[in-house]
Image (cartoon, rainbow, N blue to C red):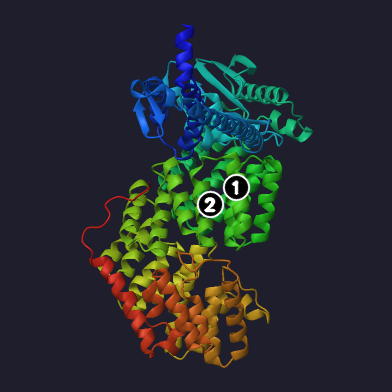
């Protein structure tokens, strides 16, 4: 053995083995880093280990059998030992091994340093991102543990109402119904659900209803440790009063478990008994479940259920709020006239607040009514009061954010949408509304992502298909996709007016009157007293040369006060048609009168405020004033309108964008070169929506009509749109990937 060891040492087999092991360790460490950096599959690392293991005996055998000589590599048996240089090779191997050891120590030290940094970064991320507020809870949908499936609506109602009660505690972040409903019958672990919703605790439970008895089981769980923080089983006689008592006890127990303090007002709200009529309560549950579906037919059903609830219990304040919300949503969808909504929703809210002046939900609904009536200051005050009373009511953040968009305060709107999404992260309508704000920012790709995410959350969410179609049409130029998405929106909500209207207007852009007519016509039949369909029919009549019909519908449209940005767009077009007719007749006073009636602020003040609601009207009015000789006021309106556009309060593209408003301003100011340059920019960026309305026969651009460059660009746009229409086939499905 001594002789063998000496021979192994003489032939440098031991040194080769040591150098190989050190080199292998360094190689594997570097391999780990590269595999992770290049995101290579796991088998690459395993293969590297296997090759180095197999190479070790080969290296030893090679060192034993061969020797390095001045003449090169030779078989050891053929080397004369008197001239062997193994001692010299040994020194070189020692130096190589020492060098490899130094490299290995450096790699080891660096790896430990990076590991420490990664651990610290991970801890920081958990602190800053993953760790939710401690006083936060997601109430998962309750299980119906009754034998009868007919009790499912009752179980859902108990869950929804309990969630509402918990949300009244300002110190506890509560996730709204829309988001937690995504986890019905989920198999996801609590920690994953909590991470997705941004909460620390989960409340789960079940409801059993049998005869005149009800049993409710609940448990509160720490989502990270899966530790039960609190649990209870309630068995009571089935009455409305007992249900609210149980809910009150559960809310207080949760507050205690999360170590939060309830204010006196919060205790009073939690202890209140909204109704003692069980049948009325069940109708109320059914109404809210219909509202959550957010389509025109469901709104009608919701009204029926809430009406039954208040008929059974005229003192049921929350049912009046639900009724008012249903009226507003039905009016917005086109199934109720504005005046009728004001009367019905106003009466319902007056009754609700008389019964209970502390209902945050009622102030939110009142804010919606004030906004629709044009009282933005009053609406804003109501929304703020609603948030003060119920800071977890996600609907208020939605409605207030949408009002802020209308007021041109888009950045504030994004912040409030964000606050709403903290409380309802999986809400399709909140995600959709954030997409609308992105459009106003000019972030069209981000808007598409938001609309697609909303559809992912609810595959039948009709309004998101509509908005996705509109951004494809008016911002991205994907006409086939727009048509496919509008089709989906109509399929999922056949009673809605807007998808039909926009689809018809899109066909007008393509020059296809035959396809435009049935869609715009059906939109008007669904909502004969709605501004959008009336204006749309006026545009269709004007397009096909039916002047008298166009004027009649335009006059009807302008009598309806707009309260949202697309209403303003349609009203401005209707006013333009009426103005143009009066100008053709030489009736300057008549043309001016339309704007005095609709936008008195543009004429009453020497320093009119120009905003998202009136800048289009201001430009059109400026032309009337120029024709009347009032050049100073006209110039003021044009200068201020241009300043508004250049301030970036809205983007050029999209249905709600300013389009070629700047082109009109420059043309009216006599700056043809700037007007043509702006038009070139608009066309190059993809502006097409309503091109025929603005480029053909629009008096605002009269100064450009004889310009060859202008006519060339008009022809370019027209050819591009007709080319879209003539493409065979097209997208059969709306892309939501």
**Residue highlighted by disc 1:** 418
Marks 1 and 2: in contact by CB < 8 Å?
yes
Q: Is residue 297 left or right of residue 381?
A: left
**Residue 567's mark?**
none
Q: Nearer the viewer, residue 350 or 198?
A: 198
In the rendered image, the residue lying farthest to the right is 264
Q: Position of residue 271 (x, y in %)?
A: 70, 28
Q: Is residue 288 left or right of residue 254?
A: left
Residue 652 lies, with reference to residue 86, above or below; the image says: below
Q: Earlier in the sequence, mark 2 or mark 1?
A: 1
Circle 1 packing at 10 Å, graded few (<14), some (14-19), many (20+), is some
Q: Which mark is residue 434?
A: 2
Helix, strand or loop for disc 1: helix
At mark 2, the secondary structure is helix
Q: Quadrant of residue 317?
A: top right
Classify residue 728 as left or right of residue 288.
Answer: left
Residue at image coords 44%, 10%: 4
Badge 2, how many Cα within 10 Å: few under 14, some, many 20+?
many
Q: Where is residue 95? Give x, y as percent.
A: 55, 31
Q: Position of residue 333 (x, y in %)?
A: 45, 53
**Could you tell me how far apart the alpha carbons at marks 2 and 1 are, in whole angstroms?**
8 Å
Q: Which residue lies at the image location 47% right of the left edge and 33% below the top edge?
A: 31
Place of residue 221 in the rendered image (x, y in percent of width and height, measured from the top left): 61, 21
**Residue 308 in view:** no
Q: Name the residue located 53 percent from the left edge and 79 percent from the top edge.
A: 619
Query: Quick one: 327 or 684, which is closer to the camera?
Result: 684
- Looking at this rendering, what residue extends furthest in the top direction? 1
């Amino acid at each position: 053995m001594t002789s063998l060891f000496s021979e192994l040492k003489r032939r440098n087999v031991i040194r080769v083995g040591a150098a190989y092991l050190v080199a292998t360790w360094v190689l594997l460490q570097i391999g780990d880093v590269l595999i992770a950096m290049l995101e290579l599959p796991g088998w690459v690392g395993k293969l590297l280990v296997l090759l180095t293991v197999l190479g070790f005996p080969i290296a030893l055998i090679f060192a034993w059998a061969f020797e390095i000589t001045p003449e090169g590599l030779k078989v050891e048996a053929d080397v004369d030992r008197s001239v062997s240089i193994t001692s010299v090779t040994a020194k070189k191997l020692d130096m190589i091994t020492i060098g490899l050891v130094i490299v290995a120590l450096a790699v080891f030290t660096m790896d430990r340093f990076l590991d420490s940094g990664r651990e610290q970064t991970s801890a920081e991320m958990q602190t800053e991102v993953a760790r939710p507020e401690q006083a936060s809870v997601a109430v998962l949908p309750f299980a119906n543990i009754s034998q009868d499936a007919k009790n499912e609506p009752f179980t859902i109602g108990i869950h929804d109402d309990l969630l509402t009660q918990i949300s009244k505690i300002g110190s506890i972040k509560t996730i709204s119904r829309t988001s937690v409903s995504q986890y019905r019958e989920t198999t996801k672990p609590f920690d994953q659900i909590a991470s997705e919703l941004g909460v620390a605790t989960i409340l789960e439970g079940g409801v059993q209803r049998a005869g005149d008895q009800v049993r409710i089981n609940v448990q509160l769980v720490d989502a990270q440790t899966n530790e039960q923080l609190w649990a209870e089983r309630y068995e009571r006689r089935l009455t409305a009063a007992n249900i609210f008592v149980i809910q009150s006890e559960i809310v207080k127990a949760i507050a205690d478990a999360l170590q939060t303090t309830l204010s006196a007002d919060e205790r009073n709200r939690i202890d209140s008994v909204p109704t003692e009529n069980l049948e009325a309560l069940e109708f109320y549950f059914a109404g809210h479940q219909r509202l959550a579906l957010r389509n025109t037919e469901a709104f009608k059903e919701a009204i029926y259920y809430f009406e039954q609830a208040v008929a059974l219990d005229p003192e049921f304040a929350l049912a009046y709020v639900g009724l008012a919300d249903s009226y507003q949503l039905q009016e917005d969808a086109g199934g109720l006239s504005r005046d009728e909504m004001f009367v019905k929703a106003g009466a319902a809210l007056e009754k609700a607040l008389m019964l209970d002046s502390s209902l945050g939900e009622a102030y939110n609904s009142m804010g919606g009514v004030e906004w629709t009536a044009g009282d933005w200051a009053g609406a804003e005050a109501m929304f703020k009061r609603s948030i003060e009373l119920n800071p977890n009511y996600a609907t208020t953040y939605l409605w207030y954010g949408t009002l802020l968009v209308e007021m041109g305060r888009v950045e504030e709107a994004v912040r409030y949408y964000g606050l709403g999404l903290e409380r309802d992260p999986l809400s399709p309508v909140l995600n959709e509304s954030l997409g609308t704000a992105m459009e106003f920012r000019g972030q069209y790709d981000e808007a598409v992502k938001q609309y697609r995410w909303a559809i992912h959350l609810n595959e039948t969410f009709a309004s998101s298909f509509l908005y996705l179609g509109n951004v494809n049409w008016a911002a991205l130029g994907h006409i086939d996709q727009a048509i496919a998405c509008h089709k989906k929106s109509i399929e999922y909500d056949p009673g809605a007016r807007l998808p039909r209207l926009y689809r018809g207007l899109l066909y007008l852009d393509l020059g296809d009157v035959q396809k435009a007519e049935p869609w715009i016509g059906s939109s008007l039949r669904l909502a004969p007293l709605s501004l959008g369909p009336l204006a749309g029919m006026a545009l269709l009549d004007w397009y096909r040369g039916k002047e008298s019909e166009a004027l009649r519908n335009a006059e009807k449209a302008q009598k309806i006060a707009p309260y949202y940005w697309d209403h303003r767009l349609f009203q401005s077009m209707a006013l333009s048609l009426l103005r143009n007719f009066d100008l053709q007749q030489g009736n300057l006073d008549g043309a001016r009168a339309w704007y005095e009636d609709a936008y008195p602020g543009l004429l009453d003040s020497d320093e009119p405020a120009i905003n998202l609601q009136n800048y289009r009207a201001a430009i059109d009015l400026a032309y009337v004033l120029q024709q009347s000789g009032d050049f100073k006021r006209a110039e003021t309106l044009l200068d201020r309108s241009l300043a508004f556009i250049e301030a970036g309060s809205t983007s050029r593209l999209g249905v709600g964008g300013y389009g070629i408003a700047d082109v009109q301003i420059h043309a009216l100011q006599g700056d043809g070169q700037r007007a043509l340059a702006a038009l070139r920019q608009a066309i190059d960026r993809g502006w097409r929506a309503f091109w025929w309305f603005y480029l053909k026969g629009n008096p605002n651009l009269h100064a450009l009509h004889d310009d060859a460059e202008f006519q060339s660009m008009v022809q370019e746009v027209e050819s591009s749109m007709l080319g879209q229409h003539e493409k065979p086939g097209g997208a059969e499905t709306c892309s939501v990937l």
